[in-house]
Image (cartoon, helix red, strand yellow):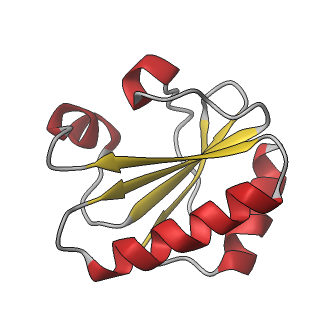
Amino acid sequence: MRGRDDGKRLEAAELGARLGERATLVQFSTAFCAPCRATRRVLGEVAGMVPGVAHVEIDAEARLELVRRLGILRTPTVLVLDADGRVVQRAVGQPRKADVIAALGEAV
């Protein structure tokens, strides 16, 4: 995980899911993206291991307005949100589990 964001904030209504109590892993995916499937598995495992962390996957093609607003250029893109929905980390490509766990340390 790498890259700070400019403090953009996302609400549960925009995500179509509840925010995690401590942090939320938001994954932007597309239907034919092979790394997206592996990313879904990694983020799901981390969310299952770390209490208060939620994983939300968003279909980038179905949510173009949100993709444009957040400057998502490739899939998978992962945003780490803190408990208030502020973007604290961003990564493009398939993340390693250890990097996701480290990035969560900044959000919680």
User: Where residue 38 sits: x, y (%)?
Assistant: 45, 79
Residue 11 seen in this snapshot: no
Viewer-proximal residue among 72 and 22: 22
Tell me if residue 31 comes above or below residue 99 in the rendering.
above
> Across the whole image, how many numbered discs are drawn on residues?
0
In the figure, is residue 54 to the left or right of 32? right
Classify residue 73 by image quadrant. bottom left
The image shows residue 23 at horizontal and vertical percentages of 71, 41
- Residue displayed at 49% across by 29% down: 17
Screen quadrant of the C terminus: top right
Quarter assignment of residue 49: bottom right
Foreground residue, 72 or 83? 83
Residue 86 rendering spot, x and y as whole percentages: 61, 32
Horizontal side of 70 relative to 3 (left or right) equals left
Residue at 21%, 40% in the rendered image: 68
Image quadrant holding the N terminus, namely bottom right
Q: Residue 47: give x, y in percent of width and height.
A: 70, 55
Residue at horizontal 53 percent and vertical 46 percent from the top: 5
Residue 107 visible somewhere in the drawing: yes
Q: Is 53 positioned to the left or the right of 77 in the image?
A: right
The residue sitting at 55% across, 76% down in the picture is: 95
Q: Is residue 66 above or below residue 41?
A: above
Q: Nearer the viewer, residue 96 or 41?
A: 41
